[in-house]
Image: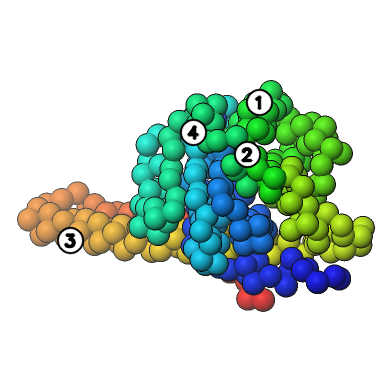
Amino acid sequence: MRRGNPLQHPACYIEPRRIAPSTWISHVPFGMYVVSELAPRILVELGTYYGVSYCAFCQAVESAGLPTECYAVDTWQGDRHSGTYGAKVLDDLRTHHDPLYSRFSQLLPMEFDAAAARFEAGSVDLLHIDGCHTYASARNDFEVWLPKLSPRGVVLLHDTQVREGDFGVWQLWAELAPNYPSFEFLHGFGLGVLAIGAESRDRLAPLFEASEIEKAMLVSAFRLLGGRLELVRELGAARRQFEQSQADIESLNASVARLQTKVANLAAREPNHPPGLLRSARRFASGWKAVLRRKLSPPKLRQP
Ligand SMILES: C[S@@+](CC[C@H](N)C(=O)[O-])C[C@H]1O[C@@H](n2cnc3c(N)ncnc32)[C@H](O)[C@@H]1O
């Protein structure tokens, strides 16, 4: 491959700090790379949710010491595809984001269209569109923000591979991709890269000018890099579930022990209890313990 092979860029291998619910996590290696390579002056994300994509961008900015201004726009209320959610999503994001990135990054809780008025025409170098995924919404987001893009402007579009229900980014992608230098990752629901400004074509030439075999290699390699992060997240979730199960077992064991003591005390105080009552109570307690052990024991992980 030619010089500038994206896979040789160290940003692809940065371990992300922000691991949270998201369908975007497998694009983090490319997200980190594209920020480091483009060194955008202004970066805007439309649709941030828990901030997996946005915090990856911010981490890349920080790691490369770039002078980038970053803006995340979201109502943080949800939409028809992500579902509606409460204030805890933004609170959780702020707890992670503010101490690390508020020096150069702002979270803007508002509608995308309203936020556009805050940015000058031709000022945005990198725009990530990941809001509501109907064709009409995605096209509106693209059209409203297109004039804001600079001569270095690059647009990332998420969910280009989802064809179920009323998802329509695939259709927008099919219309836009032939008009600009473009590249599409097929994993993680699809991520399209469009070079809107002439200057961005050179910076991302290793993507746009790759031969078919080089493109296939890039697609596979980023899928593998991203797949690893999905596994890291799943492992973290399984670990947390295991720890919770252990805590539940301990607290239920303590309850059973308390009940057993109570039964023994009652039996001692009531010597005329019906025959077999004490035995049944003990059997009940130990049977219950066995049920708890079976129900709460973590799944056995097979050794590789
Ligand atoms: C798919 S989520 C974003 C996922 C995120 N990029 C990640 O890394 O996981 C889409 C978000 O866009 C927001 N959204 C959708 N349409 C919007 C609009 N018109 N204005 C502001 N926010 C919007 C929703 O609130 C939701 O949080």
Q: Amino acid at mark 2?
A: Gly
Vertical relation: 245 (above or below) 172: below
Q: Amino acid at mark 3?
A: Thr
Element carrying mark 4 = loop
Work out how far the residue at label 4 is from the one at label 2, CA to CA, in angstroms.
12 Å
Camera-nearest residue between 22 and 2: 2
Between label 1 and label 2, give the one nearer the viewer: 2
Between label 4 and label 1, give the one nearer the viewer: 4
The percent coordinates of residue 280 (x first, y second) are 29, 54
Q: Quadrant of the C terminus?
A: bottom right
Element carrying mark 3 = helix
| Mark 3 / mark 1, whichever is N-terminal | 1
Between label 4 and label 2, give the one nearer the viewer: 2
Work out how far the residue at label 2 is from the one at label 3, CA to CA, in angstroms.
75 Å
Q: Amino acid at mark 1?
A: Asn
Between label 2 and label 3, give the one nearer the viewer: 2
Q: Which residue is mark 2?
A: 122
Vertical relation: 197 (above or below) 138: below
- Determine the image quadrant of residue 47: top right
| Mark 2 / mark 3, whichever is N-terminal | 2
Q: Residue furthest right?
A: 212
Q: Which residue is mark 4?
A: 118
- Any mark on residue 261, and which? 3
Rendering quadrant holding ligand 1: top right
Q: Amino acid at mark 4?
A: Arg
Q: Which residue is mark 1?
A: 140
